[in-house]
Image (cartoon, coloured by chain):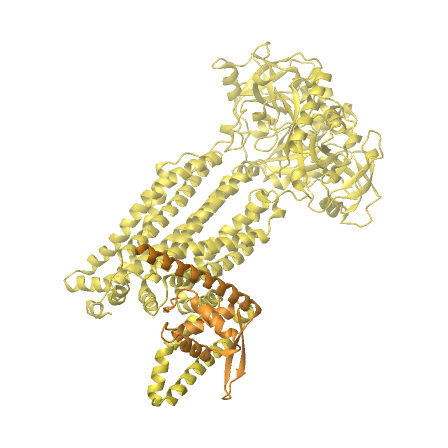
Chain colours: A yellow, B orange
Amino acid sequence: MTWWQRLTRRRKMEDQLEKELRFHLDQHVNELIAQGHSPEEARRIASLDLGGPEQVKEYCRDARGTRWLEDLFQDVRFALRVLRKNPGFAAVALLTLALGTGATTVMFTVVNGVLLKPLPYPQPNELVTVRGHSETWNTKIFGEQKVAYPDFLDCERDSRSLEMAGTLYDGGTVNEPGPPEYVDLRDISSGLFSVLRVNLAQGRAFLPEEDLPGGVPAMILGYSFWQRHFGARPDVLGTSVVLDQKRYTVVGIAPADFRLDGIEPDVYTPIGQNTAAYLQNRRAHPTGIVARLQPGATLANAQAELALIGRHLSEEYADTNAGRTFVVQPLRPEVGDVRSTLWLLSGAVSVVLLIACVNIASLLLARAVSRERELSMRAALGASRSRLVRQCLTESAVLGLSGGLLGLLLAYAGMRPFIALWPGSLPRAEGVNLDWRVMLFATSVSLLSGLLFGLAPALRSPVRGLEQALRAGARTVARTALRLHSVFVISEIALAVVLLVAAGMLGRTLLQLSSLDPGVNVNNVLVTRIALSPSTLADPSRIRPAWQDVLTRARRVPGVQSVAIVDTFPMREGNNMIGYSTSADIPPENQQSMTLATSVTPDYLKVMGLPLRRGRFLDDQDRIGNQLVVVIDDVLAKQAFGTQDPVGRRLWIPGASSPFFSGSNAPDVVLVVGVVGHVRHWGLASDDQAQVRAQLYYNFAQVPDSLLPRWSTFMSVAVRTSVPPLSVVESLRQEARGATGDQVLYEVRTMDQLASGTLARQRFLLLLFGIFAGLALLLACIGIYGVLAYLTTERVPEIGVRMALGARPADVMWLVLRQSLGMIIVGVGVGIVAALAAGQILQHSVEGMRPTEPSALAIMIPILVFAALFASFVPARRASRIDPMIALRQD
Amino acid sequence: MTEKSDLPQGTLDLLILKVVALGPVHGYAIAQRLQQVSRDVVQVPQGSLYPALHRLENRGLLAADWEETDTGREAKFYRLTRKGRSQLETEAASWERLTAAVGLILKLSEEGGE
């Protein structure tokens, strides 16, 4: 018989065992009778010889080798029965566990989808990116450097270890078919899809001959854009699309959810056909590179090879490439500051899980102590210590797994709302789902917590002082149980303190940040980007009048008070940083002082409500040909001129980065004509820690013609309204279409939205920490209540004696409350120490976070103490109402 | 599990295998045979006989079938498997080696003592 049969035919096996032993006994008895014994005598001798029939059977069952599995089934059945018999305990325990594992599973699912999952391409570990590296480039301020397009072409040609593709951010207006729409355009190498080993949803990738100047114009549509703009028409391949006045043939549709740097572009065109001047210039570095290691090549090979190519280029093109080289890094998903948010939340959620586990452990311990006599009875009947430990562990594992299952259901239900709650959009949200990894995680968490909280009661279960336990009855609480219970309560309170204080700190920080002056009047301001008509952009002489036309038309919209054009506005991604000097003597690039430079039209002061501190703001007299002038903010004034009056002083802007770029490398000299208040450009929370805070404004009218087409692709319109700003959007959109009817607004937002958006992360963290802290408080209170209720029940006889001897109800209540107060005080003490440490972590990972202040403690600790005392009040009151006569007779 | 047997550890298995090797036999008969053969030397508690039989069956050294006895009752008859037979040979051989060695040592110590 196989072990499986032995297991499944248990009933038959038992019958056969019974039959075999009976046969033995009968044979023996018959023989004894034949030898002359009386039947009773014979039966007695035979039974004595064989031994206790049940004992023999037990040994035989042990001999089967499947004993542990049978026991497991038996224990599981028993555990389920116990749970059914105690619905109150089961409900509290399962709910606690479901909340704990549910919350943890949601967090893990997001962490798994966003941070842990590899890129969604075949063999993702072969994918790398190539970055530019320059000795004078300040990575701390500017971030990682991209690569000049001619440099990319050289690398692609010379590299043997990498299969490379370039990408370029771009934008344009699609005029045909359908209404004009501004599209997020990506110029790509023909090899991009094959480097990533991605098949197109329809059609084909670009051909190498299309990726050359003068190639046949071809276009690939993004999947979402195809669905949105073309209504997912199946016959779109081969049709033509007019983008920025150029007619392209659609050759393919990118796969659904295909993203570059976390964004799904609308449209792709071959990068080789883009003849813009900055793509031929080795000084401009706009090209991003993705590459795949060739078979057999390693990352180290590629690094060495690209470094060598970089050295050759720096020798060959010394004027542009001196000091430049390339670095090869593994390609990683773009997730930004989501990483630290996720780890913070994971930390918080683990604390909740820990509290849940402690809670269950103390509940189980209380039960184990009450069941001491049951367990002692089992031991007396011959159960071994390991058998009892196994039974306890099985019971808690059953509890853990059922709780985990409920938690998984909870996580399944809570996942989408959680992602919807995420501020902005969660990067890689499309990869967040319950997969086998999550299942594995949830199962191990619930099993582990089951074992963890089953361990304490299980280790108690043994058979220490067996007869003592049997004799003691329910009148005593073992010292160790009392100590363990105190440890549980103390750690629950300490953990809850950590979360409460963290939530308190976040709340204070948020209040403080919200009350900060952003430096601009954010009420009633609408900002929107605008794409000039492609026909205008194609003809530089028409650009200035076109902008003038936009201003005039916008002013005509009812409800609009003032209008300005601006390149980068505050509290939004995007900025322009330039170097400056207070003398003609310009330091080298990486030692220059830096300032933000914003190109505006004169009404910007009115639109944004900037406070003018000194001198004047820019006006219509500041034109090409007149003196170059700038207005600076408080910070730049102090940084450049200290306490002296900046008005009338000069600044030197290095030629390479100057927006007044005159064509020579000589610095441009600008006159400071006014000082305005500082604007929190980087956001309410982040501005204080920003690397470059100084600000400078110059007139868009003084941007030279040569830079105008490129500048015009960045410009936005800002309007101050007398009515709710979103109500003017439609009429503004109509007016902005212009004479040609194909100028489109995109990224329409209010300054109010932008300002509060900069605190979205803090607000989100506060919300979740608040939820977790509330959960922790609730769980801790349940724990305290459970422990005290149990301890009080155990002390009923003692309390009866006290009351019989004259204790009043108030004394009894105080007796119980004193016990819990002791645990609460120690818990709070431990918790405060831990909270200070947690505060350090928060301060490092959340912008604008203030250090832990006594006030955060002063608000949160009383809440906790009050709740904890409330939880102890119920058992205390019950104890005070004990009738001594009944209590003394108990047991 | 404790076997209150005065037999050296593992000897019971060997004896059972040897008895069963003589032909299919039920538990009671094995007990009888063991008692007869070793009546005055060792006491085999019947309580440990059945767990041993089940363990040997479990290890595949014995196989069992339900058959009728001479008196017409159904009983569980054990027989030796191929694996059991080779196990018996190995164990018997090693038992003989052991007893021979022990005997030799006991003899030595007697001589040395004189």
> Which of the 4 image quadrants contains residue A797?
bottom left
Q: State left or right for residue A509 relative to residue A586.
A: left
Relative vertical location of residue A337 with respect to residue A811 in this rendering, above or below: above
> Which of the 4 image quadrants contains residue B106?
bottom left
Relative vertical location of residue A401 with respect to residue A132 in this rendering, above or below: below
Residue A652 image point, x, y percent: 60, 13
Q: State left or right for residue A537 relative to residue A754.
A: right
Specify whether residue A885 is in view.
yes
Which image quadrant: the C terminus of chain A?
bottom left
At a point 51% along the width and 63% down the height, the residue shown is B90
Single out the residue that lies furthest toward the left: A805
Residue A471 image point, x, y percent: 24, 67
Specify whether residue A870 is in view.
no
Residue A820 image point, x, y percent: 28, 52
Relative vertical location of residue A617 with respect to residue A39 in this rendering, above or below: above
> Which of the 4 image quadrants contains residue B103?
bottom left
Give the number of marks: 0
Which image quadrant: the N terminus of chain A?
bottom right
At a point 30% along the width and 56% down the height, the residue shown is B113
**Which of A833/A269 is in front?**
A833
**Which of A48/A708 is in front?**
A48
Relative vertical location of residue A291 with respect to residue A204 in this rendering, above or below: above
**Which of A812/A295 is in front?**
A295
Residue A169 image point, x, y percent: 70, 33
